[in-house]
Image (cartoon, grey):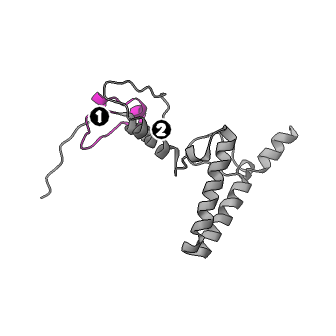
Amino acid sequence: MNKDIEEIRALFPVVEHWTYLYNGSVHPQPTPVVEAMTDFVRDWSQGGEAAYPAGMDAFMELREGLARLIGGKGSNIVITDSTTTALNLAAQLVAPQPDQNVVLEDLAFMTSIPGWRVGWPSPTSASFPRSVAWFATPTSVKRSTPRQRS
């Protein structure tokens, strides 16, 4: 096996017992990431509120590092807790109007879609058959009326 590939595989202990091909959502972390996260959480748990400045410094360093990576400015980088949160924030910032088209790829994770559905009726409840959840349209949303509590 190629030495570079062996070095990369060594960073991911999961490959010792799994063939891991899924690249979305929650995924195995490389050892250096686990170590950095463990150190960060340990420092945070031992410092309580006093750890906040060091934590904020770490986030600011991350923003600056990401900015350098993409040739941008740290002040233009937003760090969110998930891709879904980031995409929904982007949808709010873009604020498409009901008469505009928004094109999403058909493999979009379903929690990233609602922010783009401008002008769709807001159902009181929605149910999507699992096999067609990715292709839901306004007319396929099952509308129901709230039940009266007795």
| Mark positioned earlier in the residue sequence (1 or 2) | 2
The magenta segment: 118-141
Quadrant in the rendering for residue 67: top right
The residue lying toward the viewer, choosing from 141 and 58, is 58
Q: CA distance from mark 1 to mark 2?
A: 17 Å
Where is 115 relative to 80, above or below? above
Q: Is residue 77 visible?
A: no
Say which residue label 2 marks: 109
Where is 111 relative to 37, above or below? above
Q: Is residue 24 visible?
A: yes
Amino acid at circle 2: Phe
Q: Magenta region's main secondary structure? A: loop
The residue lying toward the viewer, choosing from 88 and 75, is 75
Picture quarter with the N terminus:
top right
The residue lying toward the viewer, choosing from 53 and 20, is 53
Quadrant in the rendering for residue 113: top left
Say which residue label 1 marks: 141
Amino acid at circle 1: Val
The residue lying toward the viewer, choosing from 76 and 8, is 76
Where is 76 relative to 95, above or below? below
Q: Is residue 8 left or right of residue 73?
A: right
Q: Measuring 18% from the left and 47% from the top, which residue is drawn there?
A: 146
Expressed as whole percent of the image width and height from the top left, the position of residue 138 reads 30, 30
Q: Measuring 47% from the left and 40% from the top, which residue is drawn there?
A: 87
Judge the density around disc 2: few (<14), some (14-19), many (≥20) Cα neighbours within 10 Å: some
Residue 107 has which mark? Answer: none
Is residue 121 in the magenta section? Answer: yes
Expressed as whole percent of the image width and height from the top left, the position of residue 93 reads 42, 39
Picture quarter with the C terminus:
bottom left
